[in-house]
Image: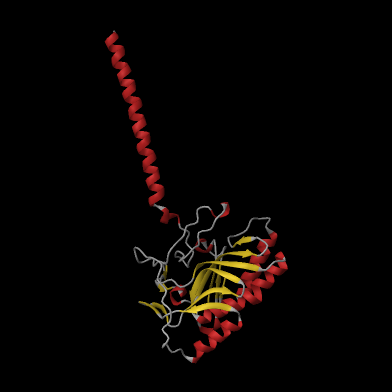
Amino acid sequence: MAGIFRAASVAVRQTKRARTVAAGLALAAVSACNTGSVLSLQPAVDVGSQTAAVPQYSGPKYTGMQTLVPSNPYMTAAYPRMDEPMAPTEQMPASEVDCRKELKRLGVVYTDLAPIREGQCGIDYPVKVSSIGSIGMKPAATLTCDMAATFAGWTRNELIPSARWRYFSGVKTIRQGSSYSCRRIAGEGVLSEHGKGNALDIMSIELNNGNDIDVRKPGLFAFRTRGFLNTVRADGCQYFTTVLGPGYNYDHRNHFHFDVKNRKNGYRACR
């Protein structure tokens, strides 16, 4: 009888030990999953594709948003591209020279970059915009000069007045999620306007009074925020040929997509 009790006691200890080992293995597996699948949590913020440079926001409202890098959905991996300054001997056409005069008139702080050529993608005379007057662009956006000037005009003529009227405050920072990025529109095989430097995705707008306005669809009773976002979105249709945002589809649930795509008959897509 004593032998039976001893055997039972050994079996219980072995069972407890096995459970402890199994729990440890399960915890390790969960940890590995959480660290190894971060990219699967990235929000899609292009026209059916993922954003190029979502900044790492802080605060509880941005929990779960990831820092992304330029990517092509048809490539397996990508890293942030290194900017090269324009060579001193680089000659610009008159239209580009005139455009840069417009940028300076609008108070845009920018840097001329060397031509970007990546297969079908690229910009002949790119500019990297770091601010529009006192308004910071984070991160700095790589665009064509025409897109930069159009966006600066919208910012000065529509965004700033709307913020002052709705919030009695100026604009401090525009946080963008994607400027130039070589990729195609998922499901269509067409080169995205991001791949030409003609597009910009806006994620949030920070005001001087501390308000940080998330572009994602506001709550039911957020009347002031909804009115502000509806106004700047609608006014964008006077400047850009494409304006897409939350409510259009799932891929645009968290940003405004602006671009200056050249379409026939002056057609504009504002949704």
Q: Position of residue 210 (x, y in %)?
A: 65, 60
In terms of depth relative to the viewer, which is nearer, 231 or 38?
38
Whether 111 is drawn above or below 15: the answer is below
Q: Is residue 7 left or right of residue 193?
A: left
What residue is drawn where x is 65% and y is 74%?
158
What residue is drawn where x is 51% and y is 81%?
145
In terms of depth relative to the viewer, which is nearer, 203 or 229?
203
Q: Is residue 52 left or right of residue 78?
A: right
Q: Is residue 85 left or right of residue 63?
A: left
Q: Is residue 51 left or right of residue 159?
A: left
What residue is drawn where x is 46% and y is 75%?
193
Whether 31 is drawn above or below 89: the answer is above
Whether 208 is drawn above or below 32: the answer is below
Q: Position of residue 38 (x, y in %)?
A: 42, 53
Residue, far top = 1
Q: Quadrant of residue 108?
A: bottom right
In terms of depth relative to the viewer, which is nearer, 107 or 162?
107
* Number of numbered discs on residues: 0
Q: Position of residue 259 (x, y in %)?
A: 52, 75
What residue is drawn where x is 37% and y is 46%?
32
Q: Position of residue 34 (x, y in %)?
A: 41, 48
